Image: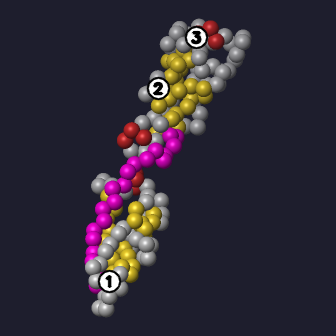
């Protein structure tokens, strides 16, 4: 992560300390190594997306002296949330004589990541993925090949919609 370094012209550095205690970061007192002690959820942070804390370094002199610096950690977003459909399944009815591009159903998913990591893209998987199409941005599924809509051949068709980010 990061190692803090301090020098003292007339004494050795004895220890590092974070004050006040921070819920996300700690420092190894002897080495100055910054340690992440708990998961930081970018989306749960305030709007600034910054975490500030005081770093104190103590020398080994008598009397002991210290210096303080303010550390500002700029928290970066990462793609750590998974898209989730608003429903477990979607049911639709389509006439077997439906035309190409007939609307079948609209699926919808959300992703709790902020920014571009939270943008959901839709696709189809499975046996009938080439007989239907899904708009990658809005989840609208339409008929692409009406010939598969033959009730004598397949009374029910199951499509698998995939939401990814």
The quarter of the displayed image where residue 56 is located: bottom left
Disc 3 is placed on an element classified as loop
Q: Position of residue 114 (x, y in %)?
A: 39, 44
Residue beneath disc 1 = 11
Residue extent of the magenta highlight:
65-84
Foreground tag (2 vs 3): 2
Residue beneath disc 3 = 145
Q: Is residue 8 visible?
A: yes
Classify mark 3: residues with Cα within 10 Å, few (<14), some (14-19) or many (20+). Answer: some
The quarter of the displayed image where residue 52 is located: bottom left
Residue beneath disc 2 = 136
2 or 3: tag closer to the N-terminus: 2
Classify mark 1: residues with Cα within 10 Å, few (<14), some (14-19) or many (20+). Answer: some
In this picture, residue 107 sits left or right of residue 114: right
The quarter of the displayed image where residue 161 is located: top right
Disc 1 is placed on an element classified as loop
Instruction: Reply above or below: 60 against 89.
Output: below
Q: Is residue 86 visible?
A: no
Judge whether residue 74 is colored magenta. Answer: yes
Judge whether residue 48 is colored magenta. Answer: no
Foreground tag (1 vs 3): 1
């Amino acid at each position: 992560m990061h190692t803090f370094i301090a020098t003292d012209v007339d004494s050795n550095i004895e220890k590092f300390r974070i004050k006040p205690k921070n819920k996300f970061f700690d420092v190894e007192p002897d080495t100055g190594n910054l340690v992440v002690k708990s998961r930081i959820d970018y989306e749960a942070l305030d709007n600034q997306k910054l975490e500030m804390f005081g770093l104190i370094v103590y020398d080994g002199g008598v009397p002991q002296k210290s210096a303080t610096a303010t550390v500002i950690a700029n928290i970066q977003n990462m793609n750590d949330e998974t898209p989730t459909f608003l429903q477990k399944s979607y049911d639709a009815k389509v006439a077997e004589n439906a035309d190409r591009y007939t609307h079948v159903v609209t699926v919808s998913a959300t992703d709790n990541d902020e920014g571009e990591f939270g943008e959901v893209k839709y696709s189809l998987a499975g046996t009938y993925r080439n007989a239907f199409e899904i708009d990658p941005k809005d989840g609208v599924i339409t008929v692409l090949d009406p010939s598969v809509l033959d009730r004598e051949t397949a009374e029910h068709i199951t499509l698998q919609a995939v939401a990814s980010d």
